[in-house]
Structures are given as C-alpha cells and as structure tokens.
Image: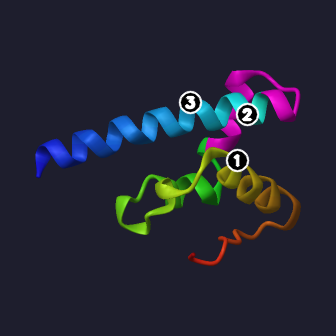
Amino acid sequence: MMSEVKEFQTILQVIVSRLVQMIAKEMITSDKDALNNLYSSKLYEKLEQQETKVWHLSVPTLYNIYIEEIKTGKIVFPEEA
C-alpha cells in the first residue's frame, strides 16, 4: 500500500512539473507563478486525489482543462474514451 502511494506521488510530481512548464510557456509566465496558480486550481485538487484518475490524462489535455477552468471557473473533463 505504501509503495503505491509513493508511486502515485512520483507520477504526480512528473505530471505537475510538465504541466507547469506548459502553463509557463503558453501563458508567458514564470514557473513559480504557473506552479502557484496550478496549486490553487480546482484541477490540482482533483489531480492530487488518486481515485479521480485525472492523472491518467495527458499533459496537453490537462492544460486545456486548466485553461477552461481559468476562463469559466468550471472543470470540464473530456468524455471517457
């Protein structure tokens, strides 16, 4: 059980790192601001809950969800394939 949690934390760090880089690049902001903005988003709330399976989504998909949340205040997940 413990190793599963550790594994998830590792995956989450990689996803967050890539997503922050994409946010910073696309929105022309610093990594620090991108990270702070992501951490305060509803998307991140869902992302850090392993059971939501949001972390299965690709980084570009997560970025699009993040942008949608900024624009509308809502999280819209793509339909499950």
Residue wearing tag 1: 60
Nearer to the camera, 46 or 11 = 11
Q: CA distance from mark 3 to mark 2?
A: 9 Å
- Residue drawn at point x = 73 percent, y = 33 percent: 22
Query: Three-letter amino acid code at disc 2?
Result: Met
Residue 29 shown left or right of residue 36 in the figure:
right
Rendering quarter of residue 76:
bottom right
Q: Earlier in the sequence, mark 3 or mark 1?
A: 3
- Read off the residue under disc 3: 17
Q: Earlier in the sequence, mark 1 or mark 2?
A: 2
Where residue 68 appears, x then y in whole percent? 81, 61
User: In the drawing, does residue 53 fall left or right of residue 24?
Assistant: left
Question: Judging from the image, what secondary structure is the residue with disc 1 in?
Answer: helix
> Are the residues at dot 3 and dot 1 in contact (C-beta closer than 8 Å)?
no
Count neighbours of disc 2 (C-alpha within 10 A) and say few if under 14, some if 14 to 19, many if 20 or more: some
How far apart marks 3 and 1 lie (CA) works out to 13 Å
Using the image, determine if residue 55 lies above or below residue 36: below
Compared with 48, 52 (above or below) is below
Q: Closer to the camera, 56 or 24?
A: 56
At label 3, the amino acid type is: Ser
Please tell me whether the stretch drawn in magenta is mainly helix, strand or loop: helix
At a point 15% along the width and 42% down the height, the residue shown is 3
Q: Point out the residue furthest to the left here.
A: 1
Which residue is painted at 69% across and 68% down in the image? 75
Q: Which residue corresponds to the image point at 63% horizontal and 45% vertical from the top-left?
A: 59
Q: Which span of residues is magenta-colored?
A: 25-38
Rendered image coloring scheme: rainbow
Q: What secondary structure is marked by label 2? A: helix
